[in-house]
Image: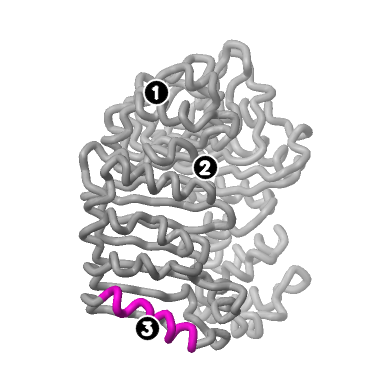
Amino acid sequence: MSALDSSMFSHVGKASVKAAFAPKATTSYFPKKVLLSIFSNMETTELLKAAAVDQRWRRIVLTPELWTTLIDPPLGLLPRLSDASEVTALDISITGAEHFRKLCTLLPRFLPQLEELSIYLYSRDAGSFPFESLWDVLCRPAPLLRTLCLKGEFSWRGIPAGSSLLGGKAGKLRTLILGGFRPVNGKRGYLVSAFSGVRVLDIAGPSLAQTGLTIRSQYPSLRELTLHNVHPKLMEHPFVAPLPLRKLQIHFLAIVLARDAENWLRAANIEGLNEVFATLGEGFVLGSFEGRNIRTLACTAVGGIFRMETRADGDYVRTALVARDDVERVLGRLVGLGKMSHVASVRFEGVDAMRLLPSAHLEAMPILDTLDLVMSFEDIRSFGDAKVQLFDVGDFNGWPRLNNVTKFFLRGKKGFGVNVDREQVRRLVKAVTPAVTKVKCLNIAT
């Protein structure tokens, strides 16, 4: 809540809900956003009283929007939720075993009417959770369910041999998100069955390893796929993507070698996909556009890791996480593959990323039109410090190559602020201007 909202409702909390039970004539004056903030601080009994004020308050108390704001939500509301036919989505975050146990006993009462079910489990003591009770529920058919999301410290322990998620009947299921946990019983029963209608799948690599990569046959309608914990054993099987697939995310384990990841992705024929994200095989991934020309290059520094992104003609994007020491090598690889000659826009974010600018092979971008340099707020504050320079000595030797740039931006996410030595900004402008003689838009945010 804002400071104004806090002052208006500072007397409302777990100890007192007198203001919440105002006469019905006044309830329309409370915006939904304010009511959600108030209700999120109430105990179960208080929420039940609030739901009795009028229909509008009841709908807000029972809305999934409220539940998404709660950790270990008041499960005493679940029976009320099952009575509300308009509630078709449930989003629950749980940390305690007792809440988990209560959820498992109440879930069957309203699962048949749900279209979306998301359970987030955060606990360091997940070993004490009765997962067998949850699998007993989720191995039953749910004919209306379109989205199932299970993320956190889930365990496959307790899955009966031969059991299948949702009874092996896909129904209307379109999105299946299982995060990084391994949903198999390790013997002969597999939680994940052939759900032909699923279009979005988020799953751990070990879940598929024992049967090989049969994604194409099990999920023929798949459009988006995220694979976690991809390891060498799984990579013994070639990845054959379903024909409709458009978006792919691959998270390799640290034990996987970069060259093996690249070869595996190369055989997967990822060039035709609209979006690809990978944590290894960066140079190949960033340039895999099936003959399309890269138009934009973006490099964002996040600590010692860089998020590099290339975009080609049309709706085609490639993203890779690159270690700081490997950025120059990856950029050189793209130049060596002849991928940079059509780049028209370059965006570098973060001081470290900007320091790599001279090694970005700008001379290999003859039609470069837009150069966008963005610094974080912390970078901006240190911009005037003599010990922290935006560019290294001799960096400006690269500027004459930018004689085709017509748009040059140097700015901060939140503006330069009062801590900036404006004299350094003037020097920078003076150094840059002769090199970008065709600039029509020079934006130095101070």
**For residue 370, what is the image quadrant?**
bottom left
Secondary structure at numbered mark 1: loop
Q: What label does residue 117 carry, if any?
A: 2
Give the x, y percent position of residue 28: 49, 77
Q: What label does residue 430 carry, if any?
A: 3
- Marks 3 and 2, how far apart at CA: 58 Å
Give the x, y percent position of residue 17: 70, 73
* Residue depth check, mark 2 versus mark 1: number of the one nearer the observer: 1
Q: Between disc 3 and disc 2, whose residue precedes?
A: 2
Magenta residues span 423-436
Secondary structure at numbered mark 2: strand
Bin the neighbour count of mark 3 within 10 Å (Cα to Cα): few under 14, some 14-19, many 20 and up. few
Residues 16 and 98: in front is 98
Q: Which residue is mark 1?
A: 239
- Marks 2 and 1, how far apart at CA: 29 Å
| Residue type pointed to by label 1 | Phe
